[in-house]
């Protein structure tokens, strides 16, 4: 059941709208102003927010600016509604990145149409992102992973094989189980993963000795970059096997250099692509038109000689975000 948050200071309108939406098989939460709206948003992480503009304590514009600064809530679609009809007010709301704008009074069935349209669009974007990540995961030769909460939530067969496992067997293995204090600084490695997930470091690289399924040692090199996947902070990257005679010590380092052939604007677009942002979301974040973003995306694919977005992400991991010493 999809969750809808209604932020409206008019008690009658708020409760009547909530009652109607509940009857359409949605889970509904309510807030009487922007401040309470922020609390409810963080508590329930709704799938869509309906927000009035003129409210006490915190108006709709300030509410939206606030949740856009919070990673967990920044991509939640929002529809403004207000009695205001001036073009300036509508434009102000849309420039903030709102998905739609409804003027009061409105028909509840008109509102329902907008809700269904926006949720369907968001679901399509999520599906596209999932397909891109699956394309990345299913790479035939490179060990690829997406890491969340101590586990590889997605991985491909080459990654499992590096550690001696079949694809199905590897699903039950936690990342920590691959580390051993006898071979590597387990605590340091795990702490650096945690720091990356908390956004204090945007990328990591490490060389370490891991535990093979046979209990032997395997020397590996791991790259990772912070992204948002399914609404949660995650690390996407790849793992390669090193020769035992050259097990260089692991080093965590944040990239300070950039590829010479990419412009600063292209790097900004590339960063948002790595975070799973759509063309629309990227255009809103950078205040550029969607056609301009598409041009940058095409340029990035051409300059990096990437066939698709999955290969572009791998390029970002290898050359934009990570350096090895």
Image (tube, rainbow, N blue to C red):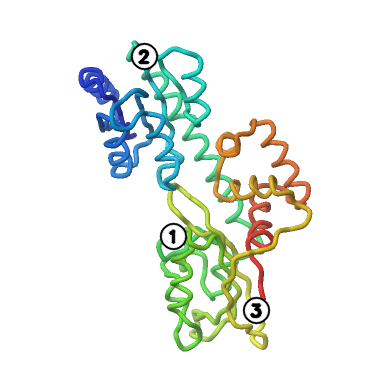
* Label number found at residue 83: 2
Name the spot of residue 312 as percent of width and height, x first.
68, 52
As drawn, is 187 to the left or to the right of 8? Answer: right
Around disc 1, counting alpha carbons within 10 Å, would you say few (fewer than 14), some (14 to 19), or many (20 or more)?
A: few
As drawn, is 159 to the left or to the right of 67? Answer: right
In the image, residue 45 sits, relative to residue 116, either above or below, namely below
Mark 3 and mark 1: span between their CA atoms?
29 Å
The residue under the point 57% across, 71% down is: 161
Q: Which callout, 3 or 1, points at the residue further toward the start of the chain?
A: 1
Name the spot of residue 269 as percent of width and height, x first.
64, 45
| SS of the residue under disc 1 | loop
The residue under the point 48% across, 61% down is: 200
Name the spot of residue 174 as percent of width and height, x first.
42, 69
Badge 3 vs badge 1, beta-carbon distance below 8 Å: no
As drawn, is 161 to the left or to the right of 318? Answer: left
Closer to viewer: mark 3 or mark 1 = 1
Q: Which callout, 3 or 2, points at the residue further toward the start of the chain?
A: 2
| Residue bearing the label numbered 3 | 242
Mark 3 and mark 2: span between their CA atoms?
64 Å
* Label number found at residue 198: 1
Q: Quadrant of the N terminus?
A: top left
């Amino acid at each position: 059941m999809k969750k809808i948050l209604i932020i409206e200071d008019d008690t009658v309108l708020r409760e009547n709208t909530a009652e109607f939406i509940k009857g359409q098989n949605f889970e509904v939460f309510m807030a009487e102003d922007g401040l309470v709206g922020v609390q409810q948003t963080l508590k329930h992480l709704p799938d869509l927010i309906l927000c009035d503009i003129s409210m006490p304590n915190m108006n709709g514009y300030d509410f939206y600016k606030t949740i856009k600064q919070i990673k967990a809530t920044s991509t939640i679609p929002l529809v403004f509604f207000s009695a205001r009809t001036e073009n300036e007010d509508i434009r102000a709301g849309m420039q903030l990145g709102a998905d739609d704008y409804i003027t009061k009074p409105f028909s509840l069935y008109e509102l329902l149409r907008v809700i269904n349209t926006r949720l369907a669009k968001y679901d399509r974007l999520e599906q596209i992102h999932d397909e891109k990540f699956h394309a990345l995961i299913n790479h035939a030769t490179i060990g690829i992973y997406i890491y969340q909460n101590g586990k590889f939530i997605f991985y491909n067969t080459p990654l499992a094989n590096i550690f001696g496992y079949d694809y199905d067997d590897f699903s039950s293995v936690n990342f920590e189980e691959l580390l051993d204090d006898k071979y590597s600084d387990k605590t340091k490695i795990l702490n650096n993963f945690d720091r990356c997930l908390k956004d204090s470091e945007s990328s990591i690289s490490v060389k370490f000795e891991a535990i093979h399924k046979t209990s032997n040692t395997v020397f590996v090199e791991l790259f990772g970059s912070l992204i948002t996947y399914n609404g949660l902070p995650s690390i996407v990257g790849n793992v390669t096997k090193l020769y035992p005679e050259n097990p260089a010590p692991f080093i965590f380092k944040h990239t300070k250099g950039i590829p010479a052939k990419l412009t600063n604007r292209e790097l900004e677009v590339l960063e948002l692509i790595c975070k799973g942002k759509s063309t629309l979301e990227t255009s809103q974040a950078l205040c550029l038109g969607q056609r301009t973003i598409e041009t940058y995306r095409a340029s990035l694919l051409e300059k990096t000689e990437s066939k698709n977005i999955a290969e572009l992400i791998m390029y970002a991991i290898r050359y934009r975000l990570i350096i090895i010493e």
